Amino acid sequence: MIEAKLEEPALTEKTLDEAAVAAAWDRNADLWTQEVRNGFDLYREVYTFPAFLSFVPSIAGKRVIDLGCGEGSNTRCFARLGGLMTGIDLSPEMIERAREQEEKEPFGIAYEIGSFNELSPFADEEFDCALSTMALMDGPDLSAALRAASRVLKPGGTLCFSILHPCFITPAVKWLTDEAGSYLGLQVGRYFDRAPFVEYWRFSRRSDTSGQQASERPFEVPRFPRTLSDYINAVSDAGFRIARVEEPRPSEEMARKHDWLNRWYQHAPLVLFILAVKA
């Protein structure tokens, strides 16, 4: 999760198209794969992904597409739940690493290089379910992505995705603390600012399991801010009926065990989940 930001991004708003997104994730691919697979993304390991797995309806025996699959860690988790998985990602470097892992540990997952804004390799009504974990927020055309997902889903098929909560993770967000350093709340700003930007951050926490230190080199992540209504309306306009929305909160036990989760337990949800059904 976000641990540090650097100024002077290499990319600018005018260059943040899909080609720029793919190139950024190609540059991130080696370090991202290494650190995610070593367990450095503790927000994912402890909080957001377990909560998402509890939110996802049963996918056993269903044909499932993972939108923005990256190096495939989450796709493999979905395959362990019985999903007949296909992953798609813009980044050739990420897909290469996903395919390498599939060769070492076969789950029958097919990985495709391509845009989830188009899903051009796939036929109409090919899948029963579309999943996406923390990826739709990082694509430049949400409406196109949801229309494409609708096209490849069978009638009654499900779309289930997670994103950073658009109401609380805004272009100007800051934790407020008292003199002792205790968190008083979350300050958000520029909620209606939809200008794309590049965020630089790193996994700075030591893994609970490996005992290794994460890299000091930041990831380069293009961001495309949107409002809550942008997401809800785009889902509806693509022909989906929203069936469930969740703002998962860390458990009290998590908050006691991990100080860095206690602030999200006390003050605000970090992520938003949406489950929708194709009409």
Image (cartoon, rainbow, N blue to C red):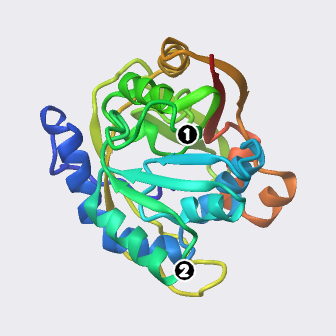
| Front position in the image: 240 or 13 | 240
Which residue position is annotated with label 2? 105
Q: Quadrant of residue 57?
A: top right
| Front position in the image: 182 or 63 | 63
Q: In this view, does 261 lie above or below 45?
A: above
Q: Quadrant of residue 161?
A: top right
User: Mark 2: few, some, or many residues within 10 Å (few <14, many ≥20)?
Assistant: few
> Under tag 2, what secondary structure?
loop
Q: How far apart are marks 2 and 1 (CA)?
A: 24 Å
Which residue position is annotated with label 1? 127
The residue type indicated by label 2 comes to Glu
Q: In which quarter of the image is residue 219?
A: bottom left
> Under tag 1, what secondary structure?
strand
Q: Where is residue 205 in the image (x, y as percent from the top left)?
A: 54, 71
Q: Give the side of residue 61 with respect to residue 172, left or right.
A: right
First in residue order: circle 2 vs circle 1:
2
Q: Where is residue 158 in the image (x, y as percent from the top left)?
A: 64, 32
